[in-house]
Amino acid sequence: MDLVGGLYCKFGTQLPIQATLRTDVQLICYSRPYNVVGSLPLEISNNNQDFTSDNLPFIYQPNATVIALSNTHGPQGGGTLVNVTGSNLFVSPNIRCKFGTTAAVGTAMSTSRVLCQSPIGAVGHVAVEVANNGLDYTTDGVQFTYDRMRCVHGVNVDLHQLL
């Protein structure tokens, strides 16, 4: 593909948007906000005039939301299974959870529940957000608290009491 005129993406009848070449076979196209849920054809051009006519489906999804967490506390060492309740969640291998700024793989159990395992974090509160596509996270701010890890430093046993 000749790149003299630049690369562009067009979603349905929306105005074209400049694209970025990622590799020799991949483009990055950022979609404009669109207030309707559904599919639009995606076309590309190398001159912003002559677009493909492949009608590749690009699906605008409703915004996901995070409503509540079943486990709202866990140790700073991570590993807590957290049930995230929300809406407009998709059963997809791309679903991700984010604890503060740290992303973690999520498992979509339904369109209203995702199971996430907390990663290692600093003691304190962080927002838990979800992304259906692994990129566009919710911004609902539902809080998870990382607690200081408890350590047992020793055990004293009175052997007389055991006998």
Image (cartoon, rainbow, N blue to C red):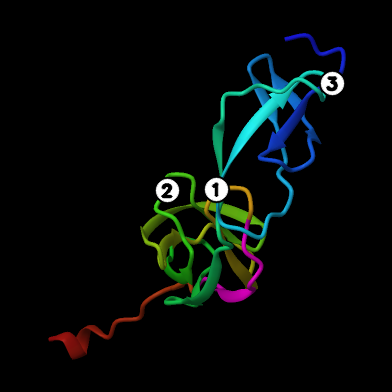
- Residue 95 is labelled as none
Tell me if mark 1 has few (under 14), some (14-19) or many (20+) residues whose alpha carbon lies within 10 angstroms of its own. some
Q: Quadrant of the N terminus?
A: top right
Residue furthest left as drawn: 163
The amino acid type found where label 2 is placed reads Ser
Q: Secondary structure at mark 1?
A: loop
**Where on the picture, by quarter, is residue 47?**
top right
The amino acid type found where label 1 is placed reads Asn
Locate residue 102, reporting x and y percent. 62, 55
Q: Which residue is mark 2?
A: 92
As measured in the structure, the alpha-carbon distance from the residue carrying label 3 to the one carrying label 2 is 33 Å
Mark 2–mark 1 CB contact (< 8 Å): yes
Residue furthest bottom as drawn: 161
Q: Which residue is mark 3?
A: 6
Q: Residue at x 29, y 82 (%)?
A: 157
Mark 1–mark 3 CB contact (< 8 Å): no
Residue furthest top as drawn: 2
Viewer-proximal residue among 148 and 104: 104
Q: Quadrant of the C terminus?
A: bottom left
User: Which residue range is magenta in the image?
Assistant: 137-149
Residue furthest right as drawn: 5
For marks 3 and 2 on the same chain, the one whose residue lies earlier in the sequence: 3
Q: Residue at x 87, y 17 (%)?
A: 5
Q: Is residue 49 above or below residue 139?
A: above
- Residue 133 is labelled as 1
Q: Is residue 155 above or below residue 108?
A: below
As measured in the structure, the alpha-carbon distance from the residue carrying label 1 to the one carrying label 3 is 27 Å
Q: Residue at x 62, y 58 (%)?
A: 137
